[in-house]
Amino acid sequence: MDKQLSKEQIDEIFNFVKSKYVRYVDLQYELVDHLASAIEDEMKKDTKLSFSSALSKVYARFPVTGFTHFVAEKQVALTSYWRRRWFQAFKSYFTPPRVFLTFLLFVFCFSITSAFGSNGAGTLLVISLVLKIFTMIKIHLKVRRNNIKVSDFLFFSTGLAFFMGNFWFEYFGFQVLSNVEFLDGVWQLGLNKTIIISLITTLTFLFTHANFIIFPKMLTDEIRSKYLHLGLNLN
Amino acid sequence: MNSNLLRGSLDTIILKLLADHGELYGYEITQKVKDLTKGDISITEGALYPLLHKLEAKNVLQAETRSIGNRYRKYYKLTPKGNQEVESLLTDMESYLHQMTLLLFPKSQTI
Protein backbone atom coordinates (compact mmCIF):
# COMPACT_ATOMS: atom_id res chain seq x y z
CA MET A 1 0.00 0.00 0.00
CA ASP A 2 1.29 3.50 -0.90
CA LYS A 3 2.44 5.66 1.98
CA GLN A 4 -0.31 7.83 3.43
CA LEU A 5 0.18 11.23 5.00
CA SER A 6 0.42 11.36 8.77
CA LYS A 7 -2.40 12.50 11.02
CA GLU A 8 -0.52 15.75 11.68
CA GLN A 9 -0.20 16.42 7.96
CA ILE A 10 -3.91 15.73 7.44
CA ASP A 11 -4.69 18.16 10.29
CA GLU A 12 -2.45 20.70 8.58
CA ILE A 13 -4.45 20.31 5.36
CA PHE A 14 -7.67 20.82 7.34
CA ASN A 15 -6.25 24.04 8.78
CA PHE A 16 -5.11 25.10 5.33
CA VAL A 17 -8.60 24.55 3.87
CA LYS A 18 -10.18 26.48 6.77
CA SER A 19 -7.70 29.32 6.23
CA LYS A 20 -8.98 29.54 2.65
CA TYR A 21 -12.46 30.43 3.90
CA VAL A 22 -14.08 27.00 3.67
CA ARG A 23 -16.06 27.08 6.89
CA TYR A 24 -18.37 24.15 6.09
CA VAL A 25 -17.12 20.96 7.73
CA ASP A 26 -18.76 18.64 5.16
CA LEU A 27 -16.91 20.43 2.34
CA GLN A 28 -13.65 20.47 4.27
CA TYR A 29 -13.63 16.66 4.33
CA GLU A 30 -14.07 16.50 0.53
CA LEU A 31 -11.34 19.00 -0.18
CA VAL A 32 -8.93 17.51 2.34
CA ASP A 33 -9.12 14.07 0.74
CA HIS A 34 -8.55 15.50 -2.72
CA LEU A 35 -5.57 17.59 -1.60
CA ALA A 36 -4.13 14.73 0.45
CA SER A 37 -4.42 12.25 -2.45
CA ALA A 38 -2.76 14.70 -4.82
CA ILE A 39 0.02 15.49 -2.32
CA GLU A 40 0.70 11.79 -1.74
CA ASP A 41 0.96 11.36 -5.50
CA GLU A 42 3.34 14.31 -5.92
CA MET A 43 5.56 13.17 -3.05
CA LYS A 44 5.66 9.65 -4.49
CA LYS A 45 6.78 10.99 -7.91
CA ASP A 46 9.37 13.32 -6.36
CA THR A 47 10.66 11.88 -3.09
CA LYS A 48 12.61 15.06 -2.36
CA LEU A 49 9.49 17.21 -2.45
CA SER A 50 8.49 18.51 0.96
CA PHE A 51 4.94 18.31 2.24
CA SER A 52 4.42 22.10 2.20
CA SER A 53 5.82 22.43 -1.34
CA ALA A 54 3.54 19.61 -2.49
CA LEU A 55 0.56 21.35 -0.87
CA SER A 56 1.36 24.62 -2.65
CA LYS A 57 1.79 22.79 -5.94
CA VAL A 58 -1.54 21.00 -5.59
CA TYR A 59 -3.42 24.11 -4.45
CA ALA A 60 -2.10 25.99 -7.52
CA ARG A 61 -4.19 23.65 -9.70
CA PHE A 62 -7.38 25.15 -8.31
CA PRO A 63 -8.81 28.25 -9.98
CA VAL A 64 -7.41 31.68 -9.02
CA THR A 65 -10.44 32.16 -6.74
CA GLY A 66 -9.22 29.21 -4.67
CA PHE A 67 -12.03 27.18 -3.17
CA THR A 68 -14.68 29.90 -3.51
CA HIS A 69 -16.07 28.50 -6.74
CA PHE A 70 -16.14 24.99 -5.23
CA VAL A 71 -18.22 26.19 -2.27
CA ALA A 72 -20.59 28.27 -4.42
CA GLU A 73 -21.22 25.41 -6.86
CA LYS A 74 -21.81 22.99 -4.02
CA GLN A 75 -24.40 25.35 -2.52
CA VAL A 76 -26.27 25.51 -5.84
CA ALA A 77 -26.11 21.72 -6.21
CA LEU A 78 -27.36 21.13 -2.66
CA THR A 79 -30.31 23.51 -3.06
CA SER A 80 -31.26 21.64 -6.24
CA TYR A 81 -30.81 18.34 -4.38
CA TRP A 82 -33.11 19.32 -1.50
CA ARG A 83 -35.72 20.59 -3.97
CA ARG A 84 -35.70 17.24 -5.78
CA ARG A 85 -35.79 15.23 -2.53
CA TRP A 86 -38.66 17.34 -1.21
CA PHE A 87 -40.79 16.96 -4.31
CA GLN A 88 -40.09 13.22 -4.40
CA ALA A 89 -41.18 12.88 -0.77
CA PHE A 90 -44.21 15.09 -1.35
CA LYS A 91 -45.31 12.99 -4.38
CA SER A 92 -44.82 9.67 -2.61
CA TYR A 93 -46.73 11.03 0.38
CA PHE A 94 -49.95 11.04 -1.65
CA THR A 95 -51.13 7.47 -1.27
CA PRO A 96 -54.93 6.93 -1.67
CA PRO A 97 -55.91 7.42 1.99
CA ARG A 98 -53.92 10.67 2.14
CA VAL A 99 -55.39 11.93 -1.14
CA PHE A 100 -58.82 11.50 0.43
CA LEU A 101 -57.68 13.25 3.64
CA THR A 102 -56.31 16.11 1.53
CA PHE A 103 -59.68 16.42 -0.19
CA LEU A 104 -61.37 16.52 3.24
CA LEU A 105 -58.91 19.24 4.30
CA PHE A 106 -59.82 21.24 1.20
CA VAL A 107 -63.53 20.81 1.99
CA PHE A 108 -62.87 22.02 5.56
CA CYS A 109 -60.95 25.10 4.31
CA PHE A 110 -63.63 25.81 1.71
CA SER A 111 -66.38 25.52 4.35
CA ILE A 112 -64.60 27.90 6.74
CA THR A 113 -63.93 30.40 3.96
CA SER A 114 -67.49 30.19 2.63
CA ALA A 115 -68.98 30.61 6.10
CA PHE A 116 -66.70 33.35 7.45
CA GLY A 117 -65.33 34.94 4.28
CA SER A 118 -61.91 36.53 4.34
CA ASN A 119 -61.89 36.58 8.17
CA GLY A 120 -62.14 32.78 8.16
CA ALA A 121 -59.53 32.41 5.42
CA GLY A 122 -57.23 34.86 7.15
CA THR A 123 -57.54 32.94 10.42
CA LEU A 124 -56.62 29.68 8.64
CA LEU A 125 -53.54 31.32 7.11
CA VAL A 126 -52.50 32.71 10.48
CA ILE A 127 -52.93 29.26 12.10
CA SER A 128 -50.76 27.73 9.36
CA LEU A 129 -48.14 30.45 9.90
CA VAL A 130 -48.12 29.85 13.65
CA LEU A 131 -47.77 26.09 13.14
CA LYS A 132 -44.89 26.65 10.72
CA ILE A 133 -43.11 28.92 13.18
CA PHE A 134 -43.69 26.32 15.89
CA THR A 135 -42.07 23.69 13.61
CA MET A 136 -39.07 25.94 13.06
CA ILE A 137 -38.68 26.45 16.81
CA LYS A 138 -38.99 22.70 17.41
CA ILE A 139 -36.25 21.93 14.89
CA HIS A 140 -34.10 24.73 16.26
CA LEU A 141 -34.40 23.32 19.80
CA LYS A 142 -33.63 19.80 18.55
CA VAL A 143 -30.51 21.07 16.80
CA ARG A 144 -29.41 22.95 19.93
CA ARG A 145 -30.07 19.93 22.16
CA ASN A 146 -27.68 17.92 19.97
CA ASN A 147 -25.05 20.71 19.98
CA ILE A 148 -25.14 21.10 16.21
CA LYS A 149 -24.06 24.40 14.75
CA VAL A 150 -26.11 24.44 11.55
CA SER A 151 -23.97 27.06 9.86
CA ASP A 152 -20.97 24.70 10.02
CA PHE A 153 -22.59 22.21 7.66
CA LEU A 154 -23.58 23.22 4.14
CA PHE A 155 -25.94 20.26 3.56
CA PHE A 156 -27.76 21.15 6.79
CA SER A 157 -27.99 24.89 6.30
CA THR A 158 -29.16 24.64 2.65
CA GLY A 159 -31.77 22.04 3.58
CA LEU A 160 -33.04 24.12 6.48
CA ALA A 161 -33.15 27.28 4.36
CA PHE A 162 -35.11 25.46 1.66
CA PHE A 163 -37.68 23.90 3.95
CA MET A 164 -38.07 26.61 6.53
CA GLY A 165 -38.08 29.49 4.06
CA ASN A 166 -41.23 28.46 2.22
CA PHE A 167 -43.75 31.04 3.38
CA TRP A 168 -44.85 31.59 -0.21
CA PHE A 169 -48.31 30.10 0.20
CA GLU A 170 -49.13 32.29 3.17
CA TYR A 171 -47.84 35.28 1.20
CA PHE A 172 -50.01 34.45 -1.83
CA GLY A 173 -52.95 33.83 0.45
CA PHE A 174 -52.67 37.25 2.07
CA GLN A 175 -52.17 38.81 -1.38
CA VAL A 176 -55.50 37.32 -2.52
CA LEU A 177 -57.20 38.49 0.67
CA SER A 178 -55.87 42.03 0.26
CA ASN A 179 -57.83 42.37 -3.01
CA VAL A 180 -61.38 41.89 -1.73
CA GLU A 181 -64.29 44.29 -1.54
CA PHE A 182 -65.94 45.26 1.74
CA LEU A 183 -69.69 45.16 1.06
CA ASP A 184 -72.70 44.92 3.39
CA GLY A 185 -70.38 44.63 6.37
CA VAL A 186 -68.53 41.62 4.91
CA TRP A 187 -65.33 41.23 2.90
CA GLN A 188 -66.66 39.76 -0.36
CA LEU A 189 -64.62 36.87 -1.74
CA GLY A 190 -66.82 35.44 -4.48
CA LEU A 191 -66.73 31.79 -5.55
CA ASN A 192 -63.48 31.97 -7.57
CA LYS A 193 -61.50 33.61 -4.81
CA THR A 194 -63.07 31.27 -2.25
CA ILE A 195 -61.83 28.27 -4.24
CA ILE A 196 -58.39 29.81 -4.77
CA ILE A 197 -57.94 30.78 -1.12
CA SER A 198 -59.20 27.34 -0.01
CA LEU A 199 -56.59 25.68 -2.27
CA ILE A 200 -53.90 27.95 -0.91
CA THR A 201 -54.84 27.26 2.73
CA THR A 202 -54.99 23.50 2.00
CA LEU A 203 -51.48 23.63 0.53
CA THR A 204 -50.13 25.73 3.40
CA PHE A 205 -51.34 23.12 5.90
CA LEU A 206 -49.88 20.31 3.80
CA PHE A 207 -46.50 22.05 3.55
CA THR A 208 -46.53 22.83 7.26
CA HIS A 209 -47.26 19.17 7.96
CA ALA A 210 -44.43 18.22 5.59
CA ASN A 211 -42.04 20.51 7.47
CA PHE A 212 -43.14 18.97 10.74
CA ILE A 213 -42.94 15.31 9.69
CA ILE A 214 -41.15 14.81 6.36
CA PHE A 215 -38.24 17.20 6.66
CA PRO A 216 -36.89 16.11 10.07
CA LYS A 217 -37.04 12.47 8.93
CA MET A 218 -35.34 13.37 5.65
CA LEU A 219 -32.59 15.17 7.51
CA THR A 220 -32.04 12.26 9.90
CA ASP A 221 -31.91 9.82 6.96
CA GLU A 222 -29.45 12.07 5.17
CA ILE A 223 -27.14 12.22 8.19
CA ARG A 224 -27.30 8.44 8.66
CA SER A 225 -26.67 7.58 5.01
CA LYS A 226 -24.08 10.19 4.02
CA TYR A 227 -22.70 12.14 6.94
CA LEU A 228 -22.00 9.65 9.74
CA HIS A 229 -18.33 10.61 9.54
CA LEU A 230 -19.25 14.12 10.74
CA GLY A 231 -20.35 12.71 14.10
CA LEU A 232 -23.76 14.40 13.96
CA ASN A 233 -26.73 13.21 15.94
CA LEU A 234 -30.31 14.39 15.63
CA ASN A 235 -32.27 12.71 18.39
CA MET B 1 -6.48 20.03 -26.25
CA ASN B 2 -8.98 22.84 -26.82
CA SER B 3 -10.86 23.25 -23.53
CA ASN B 4 -14.06 24.29 -25.32
CA LEU B 5 -14.19 20.90 -27.02
CA LEU B 6 -13.61 19.13 -23.73
CA ARG B 7 -16.17 21.11 -21.74
CA GLY B 8 -19.15 19.65 -23.58
CA SER B 9 -17.92 16.08 -23.15
CA LEU B 10 -17.00 16.12 -19.49
CA ASP B 11 -20.14 14.48 -18.17
CA THR B 12 -19.89 11.73 -20.81
CA ILE B 13 -16.26 11.08 -19.85
CA ILE B 14 -17.02 10.91 -16.12
CA LEU B 15 -20.09 8.73 -16.47
CA LYS B 16 -18.32 6.34 -18.85
CA LEU B 17 -15.40 6.01 -16.43
CA LEU B 18 -17.77 5.20 -13.59
CA ALA B 19 -19.65 2.71 -15.77
CA ASP B 20 -16.34 0.96 -16.51
CA HIS B 21 -14.88 1.05 -12.99
CA GLY B 22 -17.86 0.77 -10.69
CA GLU B 23 -16.86 3.45 -8.18
CA LEU B 24 -14.19 6.13 -8.14
CA TYR B 25 -13.25 9.11 -6.01
CA GLY B 26 -12.66 12.60 -7.33
CA TYR B 27 -8.86 12.64 -7.56
CA GLU B 28 -8.88 9.14 -9.02
CA ILE B 29 -11.14 10.31 -11.87
CA THR B 30 -8.65 13.05 -12.83
CA GLN B 31 -5.78 10.55 -12.78
CA LYS B 32 -7.63 7.92 -14.83
CA VAL B 33 -8.38 10.45 -17.55
CA LYS B 34 -4.75 11.55 -17.59
CA ASP B 35 -3.47 7.97 -17.73
CA LEU B 36 -5.88 6.81 -20.44
CA THR B 37 -5.08 9.78 -22.67
CA LYS B 38 -1.34 9.74 -21.81
CA GLY B 39 -1.61 13.24 -20.40
CA ASP B 40 -3.32 14.78 -23.44
CA ILE B 41 -6.53 15.43 -21.53
CA SER B 42 -6.47 16.91 -18.07
CA ILE B 43 -9.63 17.55 -16.06
CA THR B 44 -9.14 20.43 -13.67
CA GLU B 45 -10.47 20.43 -10.13
CA GLY B 46 -12.45 23.55 -10.97
CA ALA B 47 -14.33 21.63 -13.67
CA LEU B 48 -14.60 18.21 -12.02
CA TYR B 49 -16.15 18.86 -8.62
CA PRO B 50 -18.98 21.18 -9.71
CA LEU B 51 -19.97 18.54 -12.26
CA LEU B 52 -19.80 15.68 -9.73
CA HIS B 53 -21.95 17.68 -7.30
CA LYS B 54 -24.45 18.55 -10.04
CA LEU B 55 -24.73 14.92 -11.15
CA GLU B 56 -25.18 13.82 -7.53
CA ALA B 57 -27.93 16.40 -7.03
CA LYS B 58 -29.70 15.09 -10.15
CA ASN B 59 -29.50 11.51 -8.80
CA VAL B 60 -27.30 10.43 -11.71
CA LEU B 61 -24.54 9.64 -9.21
CA GLN B 62 -24.65 8.49 -5.63
CA ALA B 63 -21.88 9.06 -3.15
CA GLU B 64 -20.62 7.13 -0.15
CA THR B 65 -18.06 8.42 2.33
CA ARG B 66 -15.74 5.82 3.85
CA SER B 67 -12.75 5.84 6.14
CA ILE B 68 -9.45 5.06 4.43
CA GLY B 69 -7.33 5.14 7.55
CA ASN B 70 -6.12 8.65 8.15
CA ARG B 71 -9.09 10.42 6.58
CA TYR B 72 -12.49 10.00 4.92
CA ARG B 73 -12.98 9.62 1.20
CA LYS B 74 -16.08 10.17 -0.93
CA TYR B 75 -16.66 7.54 -3.59
CA TYR B 76 -19.00 8.08 -6.51
CA LYS B 77 -20.92 5.50 -8.47
CA LEU B 78 -23.77 5.46 -10.99
CA THR B 79 -27.38 5.19 -9.92
CA PRO B 80 -29.85 3.26 -12.13
CA LYS B 81 -30.75 6.62 -13.66
CA GLY B 82 -27.03 7.19 -14.23
CA ASN B 83 -26.68 3.89 -16.05
CA GLN B 84 -29.44 4.91 -18.44
CA GLU B 85 -27.91 8.35 -18.84
CA VAL B 86 -24.49 6.96 -19.81
CA GLU B 87 -26.00 4.78 -22.54
CA SER B 88 -27.89 7.74 -23.94
CA LEU B 89 -24.81 9.99 -23.82
CA LEU B 90 -22.61 7.40 -25.55
CA THR B 91 -25.18 6.98 -28.33
CA ASP B 92 -25.33 10.75 -28.78
CA MET B 93 -21.53 11.01 -28.74
CA GLU B 94 -21.15 8.25 -31.33
CA SER B 95 -23.62 9.97 -33.61
CA TYR B 96 -21.92 13.34 -33.06
CA LEU B 97 -18.46 11.97 -33.84
CA HIS B 98 -19.76 10.32 -36.99
CA GLN B 99 -21.41 13.55 -38.19
CA MET B 100 -18.31 15.61 -37.42
CA THR B 101 -16.12 13.15 -39.29
CA LEU B 102 -18.42 13.42 -42.33
CA LEU B 103 -18.30 17.20 -42.13
CA LEU B 104 -14.66 17.77 -41.39
CA PHE B 105 -12.91 14.79 -42.89
CA PRO B 106 -15.04 13.76 -45.89
CA LYS B 107 -13.91 10.73 -47.83
CA SER B 108 -12.37 11.64 -51.13
CA GLN B 109 -14.68 11.11 -54.15
CA THR B 110 -13.85 8.10 -56.29
CA ILE B 111 -14.47 8.37 -60.05
Image (cartoon, helix red, strand yellow):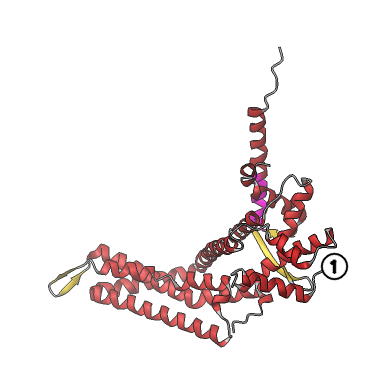
Residue visible at 66% across and 57% down in the picture? B45
The part of the image, by quadrant, that contains residue A19 is: bottom right
Of helix, strand and loop, which one carries label 1? loop
Tell me the subunit letter for badge 1: A
Relative height, residue A183 to residue B102 (above, below): below
Percent from the top left, x then y, of residue B6?
65, 45
Q: Main secondary structure of the magenta part?
A: helix
The part of the image, by quadrant, that contains residue B61 is: bottom right
Which residue is denoted by mark 1 in the rendering? A3
Which of the pair A11/A200 is nearer the observer? Answer: A11
In the rendered image, the quadrant that contains the N terminus of chain A is: bottom right
Residue visible at 40% across and 74% down in the picture? A205
Relative height, residue A29 to residue A59 (above, below): below
Would residue A101 be visible to someone looking at this image? no
In the rendered image, the quadrant that contains the C terminus of chain A is: bottom right
Percent from the top left, x then y, of residue B95?
65, 36
The part of the image, by quadrant, that contains residue A7 is: bottom right
Side (left or right) of A5 relative to A170: right
Q: Residue furthest bottom?
A: A145
Side (left or right) of B86 relative to A73: right
Percent from the top left, x then y, of residue A69?
57, 60
Which of the pair A51/A104 is nearer the observer? Answer: A51
Would residue B30 be visible to someone looking at this image? yes
Q: Residue furthest right?
A: A1
Which of the pair B32/B77 is nearer the observer? Answer: B32
Please tell me how crowded label 1 is: few (under 14), some (14-19), or many (20+) other residues with Cα within 10 Å: few
Which of the pair B49/A117 is nearer the observer? Answer: B49
Q: Is residue A197 magenta?
A: no
Q: Which residues are magenta?
A: B79-89
Q: Which kind of residue does numbered mark 1 sit on?
A: Lys
